[in-house]
Image (spheres, rainbow, N blue to C red):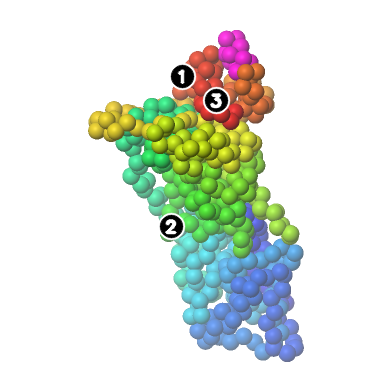
Amino acid sequence: MVARAYTVAFEGAEARLVEVQCAISPGLPAFTIVGLPDKAVSEARERLRAALAAMDMALPSRRITVNLSPADLPKEGSHFDLPIALALLGALNVVSPEDIAATVSLGELSLDGSLVAVVGALPAALAAAEAGRALICPRACGAEAAWVGATQVLAAPGLAEVVRHFTGHAPLPVAEPGEVSPPPAPKDLSDVKGQDRARRALEIAAAGGHHMLMVGAPGAGKSMLAARMPGVLPPLSAAEALETSIIHSVAGLLDEGGISRNRPFRAPHHTASVAAMAGGGRGAKPGEISLAHNGVLFMDELPEFPRAVLETLRQPLETGEVCVARANAHIRYPSRVLLLAAANPCRCGHLADPARACSRAPGCGQDYLGRISGPLMDRFDLRVEVPPVDYADLDLPADGECSATVAERVAAARAVQATRFAGAEPRVNAGAEGRLLEEIATPDAEGRTLLAQVAERFGLSARGYHRVLRVARTIADLDEATSVRRPHVAEAVSFRISFTCV
């Protein structure tokens, strides 16, 4: 007799259904797991042996074979412990094979039989819902998995409780969704003294999802401005929150099953590797680009990042997804991010200050910013210089708008875009392209004339031309204008040609 249980294997943020087959046959005592298991899966037999001993049960003195199907799909992680145990108990007729075949399960066994939390409970619940099965998971994962309301989620503290559930002695309770994480106290935009142009660029970037590069002397306020971006962005929609939480679940970053409506803000250090940024390593975990999905990726000291890391950004920024290529699989993660970057104008940082600039000016600035390749620079819709703030201005009271006021305008512009795109892709102006871009962002006659002159004078690439149109459309949305006019194009162009690389 072959007993079957079901679990999942993770391919990026997607959970694929895996059938766990167990057969007990005559022969010398052995416990074999086949089907491309990794080391953690192969060690499940020892954890299972100890867990059964804690329940006063023993493995039969026969040949036990467990097959993880499909056999050509790599199986990684300790969450296979529970389904292997259920398949074995089904083969021994301790529990009903039909009952365990109607569920999807995952969980790591401790030696005393208790279940330990594992990553990926949220995408596993989605896979169970698509398969029309209930999900059994460790109690610590129940609050996370229960956010998928389309399936029944049963959270168990240990293997003994799962056995009692299937034998009808003590049914497992249905898990309840975790709490929505409260938003942290945002840093307010009114703390920024001066920098009116940079504040305006930040508002446009937030409203349309445009990538933005800030260049200025050390201490001018670039990082301070970037840290205030989350305070002006609207909260995640329900669909966006689920998308983002699935990635964070696979990465093991969800806190006690709570789902946040706050947009992610990731700020990797400039020593980050390609795998840390794009994803990879053991299990091809998501990188910073994907962990910032639907949120902000802030890269401070942009020219200091390794060139390979910078070039890795180019395709994800254009396509909205990362492909982690492996010999036996291609893992895809979504990566629709708003990229904020900051850089000094040169290595010493004081290129524009005659009293402090180094003797190599202006060559030092060209060499330093030249580390950012032209194709990557071309992907920044907004480029703004952030000048040093005068000492006298620092003593003045804050006179700029607070984050709440700016957030209201951003939310209004995002609402216009939500209506325009009707919940489909793209979601913001920054993603519009082709005919759709022509329909929504074609400027009036004066605007077209201005744009043609700028394109000829500064040699705009085709990508740069279209990005100017997208920014102009966002500026028109902030002005509550139905059409794109010359002033909107002029402001968009001014942010495109703020400094040398166009």
Seen in the picture, residue 108 relative to 500 is either above or below; the reply is below
Q: Is residue 46 visible?
A: yes
Q: Earlier in the sequence, mark 1 or mark 3?
A: 1
Q: Residue 389, located in which quarter of the rendered image?
A: top left
Assess disc 3: are there few (<14), some (14-19) or many (≥20) residues with their C-alpha within 10 Å of its C-alpha.
some
Per the image, the residue denoted by label 3 is 497
The answer for how far apart the CA atoms under marks 1 and 2 are is 39 Å
**Could you tell me which residue is drawn at 64 percent across and 68 percent down?**
5
- Quarter of the image containing the C terminus? top right
Q: Are marks 3 and 2 in contact (CB under 8 Å)?
A: no
**Could you tell me which residue is drawn at 75 percent across and 64 percent down?**
72
- Quarter of the image containing the N terminus? bottom right
- Majority secondary structure in the magenta region: helix
Q: Position of residue 243 (x, y in %)?
A: 54, 47
Is 12 in front, or is 16? Answer: 12
- Secondary element under disc 1, as helix, strand or loop, is loop
Is 122 displayed left or right of 401 in the figure?
A: right
- Secondary element under disc 3, as helix, strand or loop, is loop
Is 42 displayed left or right of 328 in the figure?
A: left
Per the image, the residue denoted by label 1 is 480
Per the image, the residue denoted by label 2 is 255
Q: Residue 286, located in which quarter of the rendered image?
A: bottom right
- Secondary element under disc 2, as helix, strand or loop, is loop
Seen in the picture, residue 283 relative to 108 is either above or below; the reply is above
Q: Position of residue 370 (x, y in %)?
A: 59, 38
Q: Is label 3 or label 2 in front?
A: 3
Magenta region: which residues?
A: 443-454
Is 378 in front, or is 150? Answer: 378
Q: Earlier in the sequence, mark 3 or mark 2?
A: 2
